[in-house]
Image (spheres, helix red, strand yellow):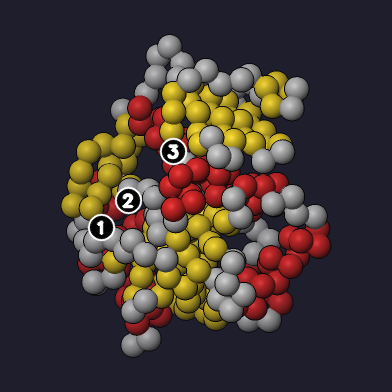
Amino acid sequence: MRLLTREARVTYAPVPPSLGEVEVGPGQSRMMGGSYLLHSDSGYRYFYQPGAGIRIERPDTFDLAEEALWLNGSVYAAVASINGFMPIHASAVAHEGQVYAFTGPSGAGKSTLIAALGSAGMAMFCDDTLVLDFSNPEQIVCLPGHKRLKLSAEAIGLTGAAREEKVGAMIDKFYAAPPAGHVREPLPLARLVFLEEGPEPALVPITGAERFARLTNDHYTAELFALGQQLDLGGRFAVQARMAGQIAMHRLIRPRDTARFAESVELARQLVTGS
């Protein structure tokens, strides 16, 4: 945690337009030799070098909300990856000293679900990005989240989370205080749950080869980790095999119907608490 805090410190100064003699244009990013350069469509530039932290160059007209989203999203994931920590696209709660993570594509309802579990007394561990530490061969450890909880107005109404300020002028979400607060210490990962849409709420264990296959379809963060650690196909296979062997997995199937939202929350609560 101290390492990531140190490496993610921010300064504001001009950023080079290229990395490794390759120009990085608007909407592009590049990782090379342990460094990372990102150039947003709006003109933000972010540059990371190990030991030097993150340098940000703002465009003439800038939006602090957009700046934070890039910094806490792609840039932070790149910093973690270069330093040996694997970011995955998941939101998570903590219960009795373990982490229960929920993953799925953008819009699957990860943040809404963990906010609802907060109303059942489970503290938020992270929102949107879960960082994994593989340094202990006996277990995979999660580092606590660095992002604030973000919810739509509808999700705030469903979960009882306390609305705070709007995320940004062009972003139709609000920051929210998780009902049961946050956990700020590293904890082992107990379970990874894949959110899926279906006609009836159900929990289905993932077993056998499907556990490995599920880990091949991740967010852009999986590619960042592979680049940051310079993993070949064998190295990628080894990471996925370890995760498949050490993490219990489930599918949580639920209808996208707000009238039945409580049913899927109850299934998730039962899975986390074992009751």
Instruction: Please tell me which of labels 2 and 1 falls first in the chain.
Output: 2
Q: Nearer the viewer, residue 228 or 124?
A: 228
Q: Nearer the viewer, residue 146 or 137?
A: 137
Residue to which mark 2 is pinned: 149
Q: Which residue is mark 1?
A: 178
Sequence-wise first label, 3 or 1 = 3
Instruction: Identify whether 168 is placed above or below 121.
Output: above
Mark 3 to mark 2 CA distance (whole Å) = 21 Å
| SS label for mark 3 | loop
Residue 9 — which label? 3
Closest to the camera, between mark 3 and mark 2, is 3
What x and y, as percent, mark residue 105? Answer: 52, 53
Tell me the quarter of the image containing the N terminus: bottom left
Question: Marks 3 and 1: which is nearer the front?
Answer: 3
In the rendered image of this protein, does residue 195 appear above or below residue 41?
below
- Which amino acid is tagged 3? Arg
